[in-house]
Image: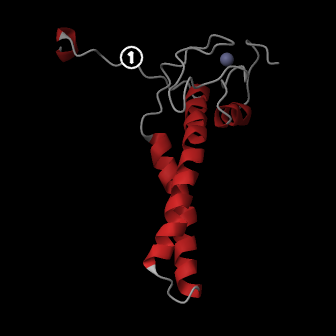
Amino acid sequence: MNHIGAPVDFWSAIWRGWRGQCPRCGEGSLFCSYLKMQSNCPSCGLTLEPFRADDAPAYFTIFAVGHVVVPLVLAFERFGQEPPLWLHALLWLPLSVVMALLLLPRIKGAVIALLWTQSLSTPKPSTGGPSALS
Ligand SMILES: [Zn+2]
């Protein structure tokens, strides 16, 4: 158990985020569903709303999946004596989808933890009212 006021080192916070846990206490869950963030940590009360990962998790997930799948496709094509396209689709589409689904929440948690360690919070988005234009 971590004391709430105790400092958390960078890699511990990233690892906690990767596991979907609060980067500060490591006990509460970051997510209330697959990718939906909790507004506050249920364990320590850390406000999680200002730490918005936006598109970064999707970008990093595509980057990681692509760097695994594309070399496998090329190696399979090179050493597989020109296998048919349906075999490529049968192998690489499910692999890509499974990898993306497994990595996306982990990468999102790590990005949120990174934002928390660097105190990179964003203000709440405006509601689009008249004051938003001025
Ligand atoms: Zn917490």
Q: Residues within 10 Å of mark 1 (few under 14, many from 20)?
A: few
Q: Is residue 122 left or right of residue 64?
A: left
Circle 1 sits on which residue? 124
**Residue 23 screen position, x and y as percent:** 66, 26
Confirm if mark 1 falls within 8 A of ligand 1.
no
**Residue 82 screen position, x and y as percent:** 50, 87
Q: Quadrant of residue 111?
A: top right
**Residue 31 screen position, x and y as percent:** 57, 26
Residue drawn at x 30%, y 16% is 126
Residue drawn at x 45%, y 48% is 59
Write down which quadrant ligand 1 falls in.
Answer: top right
Three-letter amino acid code at the position of disc 1: Lys
**17 vs 133, nearest the viewer:** 17
Q: Is residue 25 left or right of residue 116?
A: right
Q: Which residue in the rendered view is the most extreme toward the bottom? A: 81
Q: Quadrant of residue 6?
A: top right
**Residue 86 screen position, x and y as percent:** 45, 74
